[in-house]
Image (cartoon, helix red, strand yellow):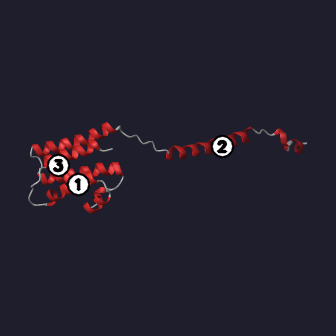
Amino acid sequence: MLEENYLKPMFSYSLLPLFVLLGGIILLLLSLILKKKTKKQVVRTTLPKEIETKIWIHDLEELKQQVIENKISNRQAYQKLSKLLRSFTEEKTKKKLSNYSLTEIKKLKIPKISELIEEYYVPEFAKQEEKNILKSIEKTKKVIEEWK
């Protein structure tokens, strides 16, 4: 009699644990798939053109103020101006201008940028500072404001 009670018919066992296990596996797989999809979607927020331009102009105005107050030399100012213009152009063109020579910049066919960089070259590297840095800052400001 003991053996008769030991084995039960197949439908007498509960299927609930099996369904719970399968449901858990399905939920786990769905959550992993959704996580991968959300990680791939990078939300890029871009500033409106006016705000972005104001940031660059602000940096130019700070540089101009440093020059006026004689906090930096003209040579240092030209170096900063060159770096600022290259960074601006990199942001706009997605090309790494900080690694480009003047010749390579000219090949990009952005005449206003190459003209300014060429203007900065002599005072940036020369022993004698002959160019007018304030005029160069104003030219750079104009190019940034007019960028499309």
At 50% from the left edge and 47% from the top edge, which residue is drawn?
A: 40
Question: Residue beneath label 2, please?
Answer: 26
Name which residue type carries label 3: Ser
Give residue 120's position: percent from left, percent from top.
Answer: 18, 55
Above-or-below relation of 52 to 78: above
Marks 1 and 2: which is nearer the front? 1
Callout 1 touching callout 2 (CB < 8 Å): no
Marks 1 and 3: which is nearer the front? 1
Foreground residue among 72 and 88: 88
At 24% from the left edge and 41% from the top edge, which residue is drawn?
A: 57
Q: State the SS at label 3.
A: helix
Callout 3 touching callout 2 (CB < 8 Å): no
Marks 3 and 2: which is nearer the front? 3
Would you call the spot at circle 3 few (<14 residues within 10 Å), some (14-19), or many (20 or more)? some
Callout 1 touching callout 3 (CB < 8 Å): no
Name which residue type carries label 1: Glu
Foreground residue among 24 and 7: 24
State which quadrant residue 75 falls in.
bottom left
Question: Residue beneath label 1, please?
Answer: 115
Q: If you read the primary sequence from the N terminus, does the residue marked by circle 1 or circle 3 appear first?
A: 1
Q: State the SS at label 2.
A: helix
Q: If you read the primary sequence from the N terminus, does the residue marked by circle 1 or circle 2 appear first?
A: 2
Foreground residue among 146 and 9: 146
- Mark 1–mark 3 distance (CA, rounded to whole Å): 11 Å
Q: State the SS at label 1.
A: helix
State which quadrant residue 11 falls in.
top right
Question: Residue beneath label 3, please?
Answer: 136
Q: If you read the primary sequence from the N terminus, does the residue marked by circle 3 or circle 2 appear first?
A: 2
40 vs 54, left or right, is right
